[in-house]
């Protein structure tokens, strides 16, 4: 397989002295009275894999549209590799895999990827794009006769055809089954291991946790957190979960136990949200209340819900970013946006 030559990288994943792959500085975008993006500041270093999380309407699509040059910012600047998005796209430095798309009839996988490759100034060899996307064995099959997972890999190969340094994936595994999702991420990791930059949006929190170096969470257009999955779990302050059987006993005292911030009773089983699970379990043991006790660390879903719930509307995002940075994050500063 033909290998693509890459610029030597520093330990941080970026060529020494290079501009970041993605930079938003004071970027804003409105659609009539709706402020979709307001005052965004965000950097993504070269070689990073970044997940963009948010509920429906959080502003993810608008952010991606600005990033790809599909929309122009009303204020501020969006740049890719130190230039405009349009310049980066024309140079073949950016590939995109968006949600929309339909199969092209009566054309094979190889023919489609080759056609797209010819539109770029310095394309990736077709055989290499097919191999990275896991499509070598399907190269001669018609695109309109593929399964959903196979068709998604074709879209990935098309995004790779220009030999991009940055690829943007909008909900890349939506509607795929578990096996197809696993195969897709194996292909994506092969691309990322070459030192390329990946930004993907997803509703699958486990994918963000497993595949991203860094997670950016949007809520109503605001970036409310930016860091690793572990850092987000700590920053959200949602605490661990202590579960045990009540055995018919009273639950009235549970809210007063050390560290407990929330109590939920499901049948005969109590679930305690606690900021100090050791103190909570010790207190329970002293009361003789331990029956089938389980202690579960906070999940990324817990953190996501805490960061994007109603109480998060006025979250001081700069403080969250500072907290994450203090714990060792290489994240960009938190920013304020309004949802589309």
Image (cartoon, grey):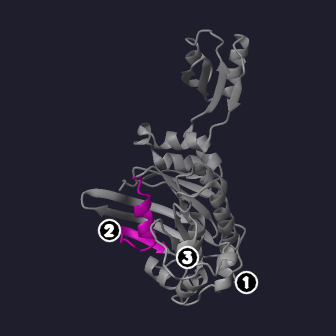
Q: Are marks 1 and 2 in contact (CB under 8 Å)?
A: no
Give neighbour class at mark 1: few <14, some 14-19, many 20+ (Cα, 10 Å). Answer: few
Q: Residue farthest to the right? A: 1
| Residue 34 x %, y % | 28, 56
Q: Which mark is residue 217?
A: none
What is the total number of numbered labels drawn onto the structure image?
A: 3
Residue drawn at 64 percent across, 80 percent down: 139
Q: Which residues are magenta?
A: 57-79
According to the picture, the residue beneath numbered tag 3 turns out to be: 143
| Residue 129 x %, y % | 64, 79
Residue 319: in magenta span: no
Query: What secondary structure is found at the residue carrying circle 2?
Result: loop
Tell me if residue 234 comes above or below residue 87 in the rendering.
above
Front residue of 95 and 91: 95
Residue 68: in magenta span: yes
| Residue 184 x %, y % | 64, 64
Query: What secondary structure is found at the residue carrying circle 1?
Result: loop
Q: CA distance from mark 1 to mark 2?
A: 41 Å
Q: Relative to residue 263, is residue 67 drawn left or right?
A: left
Q: Which mark is residue 74?
A: 2
Q: Relative to residue 240, is residue 171 drawn left or right?
A: left
Q: CA distance from mark 3 to mark 2?
A: 39 Å
Residue drawn at 62 percent across, 41 percent down: 299
Q: Quadrant of residue 210?
A: bottom right
Pointer 1 or 2: first along the chain: 1
Q: Residue farthest to the left? A: 33
According to the picture, the residue beneath numbered tag 1 turns out to be: 3
């Amino acid at each position: 397989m033909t290998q693509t030559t890459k610029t030597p990288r520093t330990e941080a994943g970026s060529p020494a002295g290079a501009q970041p792959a993605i930079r938003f500085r004071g970027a804003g975008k409105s659609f009539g009275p709706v402020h979709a993006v307001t005052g965004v500041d965000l950097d993504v270093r070269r070689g990073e894999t970044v997940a963009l999380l948010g509920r429906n309407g959080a502003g993810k699509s608008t952010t991606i549209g600005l990033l790809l040059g599909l929309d122009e910012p009303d204020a501020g600047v969006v740049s890719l590799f130190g230039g405009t998005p349009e310049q980066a796209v024309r140079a073949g430095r950016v590939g995109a895999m968006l949600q929309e798309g339909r199969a092209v009839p009566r054309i094979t996988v190889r023919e489609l990827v080759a056609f797209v490759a010819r539109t770029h100034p310095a394309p990736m060899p077709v055989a290499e794009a097919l191999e990275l996307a896991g499509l070598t064995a399907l190269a001669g099959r018609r695109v309109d006769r593929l399964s959903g997972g196979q068709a998604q890999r074709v879209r990935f190969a098309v995004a790779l055809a220009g030999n991009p340094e940055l690829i943007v994936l909008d909900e890349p595994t939506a509607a795929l089954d578990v096996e197809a999702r696993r195969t897709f991420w194996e292909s994506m990791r092969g691309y990322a291991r070459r030192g390329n930059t990946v930004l993907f949006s997803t509703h699958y929190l486990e994918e963000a946790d497993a595949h991203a170096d860094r997670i950016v969470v949007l809520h109503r257009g605001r970036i409310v957190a930016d860091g690793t999955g572990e850092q987000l779990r700590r920053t959200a302050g949602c605490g661990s979960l202590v579960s045990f059987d009540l055995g018919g006993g009273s639950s009235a005292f549970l809210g007063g136990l050390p560290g407990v911030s929330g109590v939920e009773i499901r049948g005969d089983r109590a679930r305690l949200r606690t900021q100090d699970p050791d103190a909570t379990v010790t207190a329970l043991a002293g009361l003789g209340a331990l029956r089938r006790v389980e202690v579960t660390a906070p999940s990324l879903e817990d953190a996501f819900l805490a960061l994007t719930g109603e109480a998060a509307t006025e979250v001081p995002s700069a403080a969250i970013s500072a907290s994450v940075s203090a714990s060792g994050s290489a994240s960009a500063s938190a920013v304020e946006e309004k949802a589309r």
